[in-house]
Amino acid sequence: MRVLIVEDEEKLAQSLKKGLEKEGYAVDYVMDGEAGQRRIEVSHKDYDAVVLDLMLPKKDGFEVAKAVRAADIKIPILVLTARDATDDKVQALDAGADDYLVKPFSIQELMARLRALLRRPEQALPIELTVRDLRLNTTTRKVYRQDEEIVLTLKEFGLLEYLMRHPNQVLTREQILDHLWDFAFDSFSNVVDVHMKNLRKKIDGQHSEKLLETIRGVGYRIKR
Ligand code: CA
């Protein structure tokens, strides 16, 4: 899962990024409303959700949310409000936010809200993904092949989930990098190949039927 944070308090933005990354999310942040709006308009397909502060320089969160919805962009938006003012919350939801969180909050609360947003039916994200005898549960974050549990790292899990959401479709290294790593990550590194190799060992290692496929010079796919 990849999240964009729009927050002008850099310390808070950094600690949210750190906290979410520890849980396996990829996180980018920008620090004013204009930059936030631009990033959402240009790159919303690369993100699964936006965490949007309300009080921002250049353009406030209400305006950003309104502009994004006016452009018919449906990405889930979770608003952060400093005050426990009912007005702010109502106004934010009116502007097109999906939910709000009152500062200060814990990373656990933030993650619970994000998970809830990503589970909303309009997102149509199934809780259990299945490809042949491989099962992945997005809520418990457990993976089974032939009912035997396979223990994966956070990145391997993210990688497998991404592949299983697009069965039979070849995903390029660039797509995988974009989806699972930050913009800042060196796109010339072989980080995707290394993770794929480890993932393949765990998923296909002792099975005669191989599910993960390398399409040479292009990328990877999982066979249904
Ligand atoms: Ca602020």
Image (cartoon, rainbow, N blue to C red):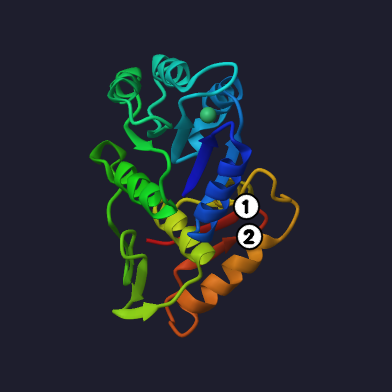
**Residue at mark 1:** 173
Specify which label sits upstream in the sequence, 1 or 2. Answer: 1
Image location (x, y in percent) of residue 218: 63, 52
Disc 1 and disc 2 in contact, CB within 8 angstroms:
yes
Q: Residue at x 31, y 39 (%)?
A: 123
Of all residues shown, which one is farthest toward the bottom?
A: 206
Measuring from the top left, give residue 72's x and y in whole percent. 39, 19
User: Who is closer to the viewer here, 121 or 64?
Assistant: 64
Q: Residue at x 44, y 77 (%)?
A: 151
Residue that mark 2 sits on: 192
Residue at x 43%, y 43% (from the top left corner)? 104
Badge 1: how crowded within 10 Å, few (<14), some, or many (20+)?
Answer: some
Task: Please say if 95 is above or below 21.
Answer: above
* Residue 158 tag number: none
Q: Nearer the viewer, residue 3 or 54?
A: 54
Compute the Cα span from label 1 to label 2: 7 Å
- Give whichever of 89, 169 is nearer the camera: 89
Quadrant of residue 219 in the image? bottom right
Q: Secondary structure at mark 2?
A: helix
Three-letter code, disc 1: Arg
- From the viewer's perspective, is residue 23 above or below residue 96? below
Residue type at numbered disc 2: Val
- Badge 2: residue crowd in 10 Å (few <14, some 14–19, many ≥20): many
In the image, taking residue 154 as reference, residue 10 lies left or right, namely right
